Amino acid sequence: MAPNIAIVYYSMYGHIKTLAEAEARGVEKAGVKCDMWQIEETLPKEVLQKMYAPTEQTGHQILSDPSVLEKYDGILFGIPTRYGNFPAQMKTFWDKTGGQWQRGSFAGKYAGVFISTSGLGGGQESTAISAMSTFAHHGFIYVPLGYSTAFKQLTDLTAVHGGSPWGAGTLSAGDGSRMPSASELEVAEIQGENFAKILLRAPATTTPAITAQPAAAKTTPSQTTPPQRTPAENEKESGPCGMPAKCMIHSSPSWQQICAKVKAHRDSTIASVYSQLPPIPTGLPLNVTYIPALILTPPEYAITSLPITTLLHYLSTRTISSTTVINAYLRCAALAQELTNCLTELLPSRALTRAQWLDNYIAEHGKPVGPLHGLPISAKEHICMEGLECNAGFVSWVGRKSMDDALVLKILWDAGAVFYARTTEPQTIMHLETSSNLYGVTVNPYNRLLTAGGSSGGEGALLGLRGSCLGIGTDIGGSIRSPAANNGLFGLRPTALRIPVTGMGHAIGGCEQLLGTLGPLSTSICGIKIFMKTVIDAEPWLIEPSLVPIPWREHDLIGSSGEMGRTQKMDQQGKRKIKIAIMWGDGVVRPHPPVRRVLAETVERMRKCPQIEVVDWQPHRFKDAWEILSHLYFPDGGASEAKEIDVFGEPWRPLSAWVIKDNPYVSHLSIEKVWKWTEEREKFRAEYAQLWSESGKLSKKVFGKAELKAGRDAVVVGEGVVMVDSDTSTKNEEYCERFSNQAHERDGYDTSDDEEESPIDAILCPVAPGAAPPFECARYWGYTSLWNLVDWPALVFPVSVVDQERDSKEVDYTPTCEEDEYNHELYIGPERYADAPIGLQLVCRRFEDEKVVGVYEYLNGLGVFGV
């Protein structure tokens, strides 16, 4: 739970009040709400008039009863000094706290101070020191401002200012004419934010952890003060040492207790929905994708099986109500949680209230509220929703409430969407699996001994069971594409700076060396397009100015004439051929037999289409890419993640340790080293841009020596796929060269023509070196993360599944490196990967997001993907 914070001040002329409001802004910046209280005036009006002070207190609640403060975990006190001490008004207040002292009501609570004085020598530090006696007697834990967060401001000698390491401060001048400066307000805001962050990591103090006797009757939410108790009753309440209740021992909750509480909350949000479902059969097989058809009612199952375009049509024409749709998806999502552990919470009350409002709107106005009217959308947990927790997979973040919705959610909401489910992510959000101490492991619905992928694995599992039709994930190394491939889905990693990312929780906010992206996962390509078009049509760059103002452009693939000055191949109808480059492997880790088979079969179907020209793509510097990525993922050496993990001593999950602690390329970088690796990133991107631009020269080597170096083991000949060994012996090189020439001749290519042609339209490649791996084994990111490094959009789509007869284990392959050996040993045979989906990945150049979707639609229309 988020801590309860109060800001308590006395202000005669407004100086401390202004500082108090800056402190409040800082507290709220940390994601915590606070209450503002001003201490009751004790001077009569005629005296205030003679002092030219306001005679009425306005703006915030008046505090006269100190028992009100017992409900707070932390209090920031604003003190206008009187001779280096409390003013009379605050002394009067403290004189009322004898009961709290006797009961120990403030013991263990946190306190901080901010101060106003007339001048530099007027008590900026001594006022705080004087307050320590009062704090000590009550047992407050004092939280100083310190220098760690405000060193620059506190040591600035270019302007006069208040403030000290004891707390923020302002100088009012002898006549009160000077109001707080911008610098002083900045320090106050820093103090408020730092104070709240410290309380977020601290145990709650409103309920003592150890008592010898049960506490008095709990207050109800409607009560503003606790019930009055007699001294005799207070004496009966003794602590473990036999002293009165003011002497209490307060202990921090363990990480296990916090995790149990989080799971209990998750279960409570699902209980009302899940309790209405029939019991799940016992003795389930590994593949549970058929269970929704058994458990849901026929109408519910039909609704969750509808294509998105059909569902939106039914909703917009009132063929079906939004309430009916949301009820069906809530029930399917609750079932998906039971089968795969994919949710952090369900939102039935919010979702059904929204659905009813949409139903009322369309009934009254006769039209939908927007293009997504009534569409259920799920979202990854660290995409902020106002009023809901955002823990980003860290135990230490439990209780952090989001103050606002993420920008992308606001856009989708305005378009008519309904948010009904939030999904799991891994610790650190830097796994290609989904495993955390908070929620455990999310499993694959096609084979529950395999991972659902990550870091958007909760979305993957939920969509895989059709508990969602459109979900929102994030991707900085493959976190959308991995779950999409593992669960037989569509997933798009957009170009960075096209989709807004304002309002996401992560440990390294502000680090821009590698930009994460936010994007869609869906059960269909239509869902991908609908999401992208809806968000980009809202012109989010007007609100998030770092975004590139490029509208969504429908791409006329075959109508495009190619690049100026370059030859364009045509098919028999005079339309230009689409040119697809095949990347068979990345030159580091050889894909497993199912991946190689599916890719080879796909290429065979492509080569039968006269509308397609197929060339090879040479893998380029994949090992170097991981070195650059690792340095830029964690320029602080992983210190931010380690700090959050270590707060409560939660264990490092194996893949968290693998990507940070065990990664030889992760270290704390100086600013010069950050510049160096950022420059390496730009050089790498320039190399890839050049490779693409020069890809028109690739048509001469459709299949040749390059494919063997890339780990390819199949060449397409005539009507079939011929498998060859993957070593680089002369025999195999000649074998491939011979069939390469035959392929050229069959398609009518002029192999003697040296004229440069237009570059490729897209790259087709694996998504990963295998199907969904066993748990804690997703230890190679190369097939997805490289495209993050060069910032090219990548679309993942389903093609096939592991074949128990055709995808036997290789017995004569010799791995080429440590990573290759690890991956090779994972594949003990197709039985480990039974029913696991196999997807492929299409990649286009930067900002060609529309094109990569269009390429898929065009190729799929030709039947090359076999689905």
Image (cartoon, helix red, strand yellow):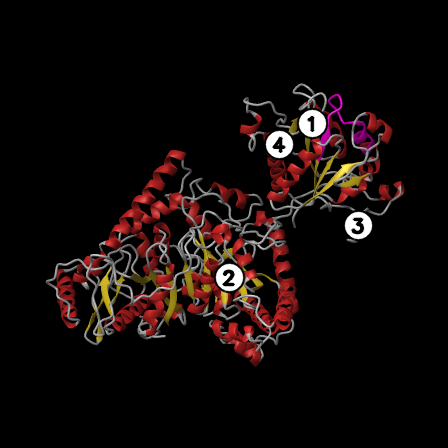
Find out whether the residues at labels 2 and 1 contact each other: C-beta distance under 8 Å.
no
Q: Residues within 10 Å of mark 4 (few under 14, many from 20)?
A: many
- SS class of the residue under badge 4? loop
- SS class of the residue under badge 1? strand
Looking at the picture, does residue 513 appear above or below residue 328?
above
Q: Position of residue 160 (x, y in %)?
A: 60, 22
Looking at the picture, does residue 479 appear above or below residue 323?
above
At a point 20% along the width and 57% down the height, the residue shown is: 565
- SS class of the residue under badge 3? loop
Q: Position of residue 407 (x, y in %)?
A: 53, 54
Q: Earlier in the sequence, mark 3 or mark 2?
A: 3
Q: Which mark is residue 214?
A: 3
Amino acid type, residue under disc 2 in the picture: Gly
Q: Which mark is residue 458?
A: 2
Nearest-to-viewer mark from 2 and 1: 1
Q: Which mark is residue 116?
A: 1
Q: Which residue is mark 4?
A: 145
Nearest-to-viewer mark from 2 and 4: 4
The alpha-carbon separation of the residues under discs 2 and 4 comes to: 40 Å
Taking the image as shown, residue 114 lies to the left or right of residue 221, namely left
Q: Nearer the viewer, residue 382 or 310?
A: 310
Q: Which residues are magenta?
A: 77-93
Q: Earlier in the sequence, mark 3 or mark 4?
A: 4
- Quarter containing the C terminus: bottom left
